[in-house]
Amino acid sequence: MPRLLLVAFAPADNAALGGFAEAIGLEGTLIAFEGEVPPADAAADALKKEADGFTHIAAVSSMQSKDVMARLAGLLDAAMVTDAIKVVSPTQFVRPMVAGSVLATVETMHEPVVITFRPASFPKVEKNGDKALKVLETTTSRTSKSGGAKGSRPDLTQAKRIVSGGRPLKDAATFEKIIGGLADKLGGAVGATRAAVDSGIAANELQVGQTGKIVAPDLYIAAGISGSTQHMAGIKDSKVIVAINTDPDAPIFEFADFGLVADLFTAVPELTEKV
Ligand SMILES: Cc1cc2nc3c(=O)[nH]c(=O)nc-3n(C[C@H](O)[C@H](O)[C@H](O)COP(=O)(O)OP(=O)(O)OC[C@H]3O[C@@H](n4cnc5c(N)ncnc54)[C@H](O)[C@@H]3O)c2cc1C
């Protein structure tokens, strides 16, 4: 008898998890981390204790969930499917490969199955929010750690507006001032390229792309981002892409709905002032 455990890493995951439960056709039991999610090993250990008897354990794809769920799959000797975008049956899932240029249907050969899925590919169904919600207790409270503008920004995977910055942003303070400044004016989230993350300009959890977060906002503003295949793989479901780049031949302009050939250090603050 199939049983589905839905794991919420953040409150914003609940509606996407509801949509996944509907797609797979199983009644889901929701379990949530309250407060800061512990390091991946500890989080996977905590989940293993709750996973007994479940045939399917699912979470929204994020860098954090992939880290934790892969460990959980190892602990449970489970089959693992990452980044599912469609449920064909409880054992068959469609997932993108090669930066989204190929869609593969994969079949799991044994239970349990640990799944991460892309929230933009499933409808939002707010039905699990008030169900027998079991809370995994953790030591730090999410709210006590966050604060100021950064803490109140929407989750990247759920945000309607995202402002992202790339390598030219120089340092963390400049990134926060320029990219964070516009994001806050728009009530949006902040994203970054891997180049920005690798150079210490932006935090790891802000990385958007093939090996970062997959986003699907109404508006994605890319400032100082070249438009690599790996970055574009994470933003292709955005409704409107605006690119600001000094190089008129930057690949991002091929994908952008609106392009501005300009220096981001003048264009973005100007935009922030005018919004
Ligand atoms: C296996 C693998 C996985 C990867 N996964 C990801 C991923 O998930 N996400 C991701 O983002 N990358 C990923 N990458 C890295 C990716 O290939 C690129 O290196 C990266 O996206 C480039 O980031 P960038 O656009 O910030 O930097 P660059 O490519 O260096 O581009 C910077 C751009 O800024 C412009 N510019 C410079 N100065 C200014 C200015 N003053 N104003 C305006 N524009 C300016 C330049 O013209 C240029 O187009 C991955 C790579 C590999 C190999």
Image (tube, rainbow, N blue to C red):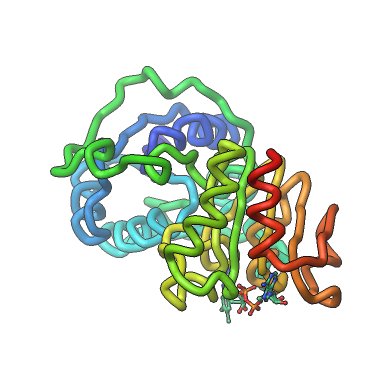
Query: Quarter-wise, where is residue 68 in the image?
Result: bottom left
Residue that protrudes farthest toward the top in the picture: 130
- From the viewer's perspective, is residue 122 above or below residue 202? above
Query: Quarter-wise, where is residue 6 in the image?
Result: top left
Where is residue 273? Give x, y as percent.
Answer: 65, 44
Residue at image position (76%, 73%) is: 246
Where is residue 20? Give x, y as percent.
Answer: 54, 37
Residue at image position (71%, 44%) is: 219
* The one of 107 and 258 positioned closer to us in this rendering: 258
**Quadrant of the frame with the C terminus:** top right
Residue at image position (24%, 52%) is: 43
| Residue 91 relative to residue 143: left or right | right
**Quadrant of the frame with the N terminus:** top left
Where is residue 194? Give x, y as percent.
Answer: 53, 71
Q: Is residue 39 visible?
A: yes
Where is residue 74? Give x, y as percent.
Answer: 30, 64
